[in-house]
Amino acid sequence: MGNNIKNHIEKRPKAIKKKYLILSLIVFIISFMLVFLLFSASTAGLRSDLALQVQGLSFKQESVFNQVGLKLDIPTGKDYSGSGWCQNMKLYHPGEVFPHDGVNGEMSILYNFGRFENGRSTFYDPDSDYFNAHYGVYAIKLGQGAFGWKNGTLDVAAIVKVVSFDQLDLVMESLGCPSSQRHFDYQITDIKEGPEMAGFSDWIQIDAMIETNSPLHHQTENLIGYLQYGTPPKDYNGEDFPVAATMGRLYLRYDETRNVTVIYFVIEKTQELIDQTSKDYLMPIQWN
């Protein structure tokens, strides 16, 4: 019995040492994986998606979509083989901080942009169809009245201000574009009745040509926008945030039952791309 106790005591330090080595190895592997995820260019897309999904969860309860009980099934890159859009929609809630006149109001945004290639979103790639491109949905709820209409007439200027706010005060600001350099000019090319979508036939379609900043610039610091889109190309040798020609389309309607203005939007380089994204990603949106 004495020998058994002695052998057991001698084995314990070896067993403890082995467990310590295994634990140390596990901690090292997890740490390596976290560092790889946080800093590797090859994981920029995964890093972006994880961060934006966590952000979306933090906004979910207060979002206008949740407030009015509107759940949307929006097509993304995972719905089409070879799609250049990201796999998941992103939720952002600027809340009361958006352009609107006088009355209380809130806005939330569901949006998507170009998938990641070579460590950054194709949002940065001037040769890509997804350069400086977004699509998604704005939900705007006012304390009184319907956003987008004034005295019963469509208020195009107010509607365009929301798009400009999104492009300049949210996107370009997050990438470090100076306020003095931010640019958004537009020319409305068509306003007409929109197609029937989600079972509603009272949509209004607005098409426009737009000149606004592109995201291309030289990185001089770490910015919050890089977590979303990745960092700009290191070999870029042009001016920072040059103005580029693009096109936009909106579909909007005021849902009286929920007291919310819903605006589908897409911004892309050509009319052909606008039409295709409208057909594949906006018109099929389902309301639940």
Image (cartoon, grey):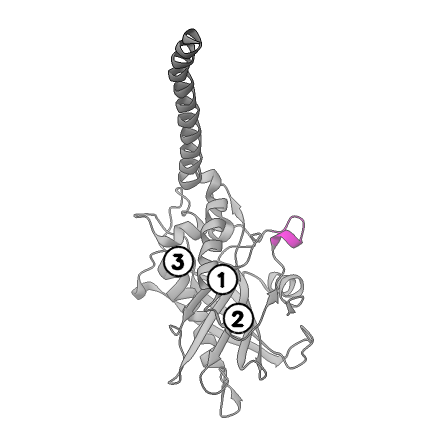
Which amino acid type is shown beneath numbered disc 1? Leu
Residue located at (61% from left, 53% from top): 77
Please provide percent x and percent y for residue 74: 61, 63
Which amino acid type is shown beneath numbered disc 2? Phe
Q: Which residues are drawn in magenta?
A: 77-83
Which amino acid type is shown beneath numbered disc 3? Pro
Please provide percent x and percent y for residue 189: 56, 76
Please provide percent x and percent y for residue 279: 67, 65
Image position of 176 with respect to 136: above or below: above
Image position of 138 with respect to 134: above or below: below
- Quadrant for residue 194, please give it: bottom right
Q: Secondary structure at mark 2?
A: helix
**Disc 3 from disc 1: Cα separation:** 27 Å
Is 109 colored magenta in this rendering? no
Disc sitting over residue 242 in the figure: 3
Image position of 268 with respect to 163: above or below: above
**Disc 1 from disc 2: Cα separation:** 10 Å
Report whether residue 125 is seen.
no
Disc sitting over residue 91 in the figure: 1
**Does residue 232 appear to the left or right of 268 in the view shown?**
left
The residue pinned by badge 2 equals 65
| Of the image marks 2 and 3, the number of the one nearer the N terminus | 2
**Disc 2 from disc 3: Cα separation:** 34 Å
**Does residue 194 appear to the left or right of 17 in the view shown?**
right
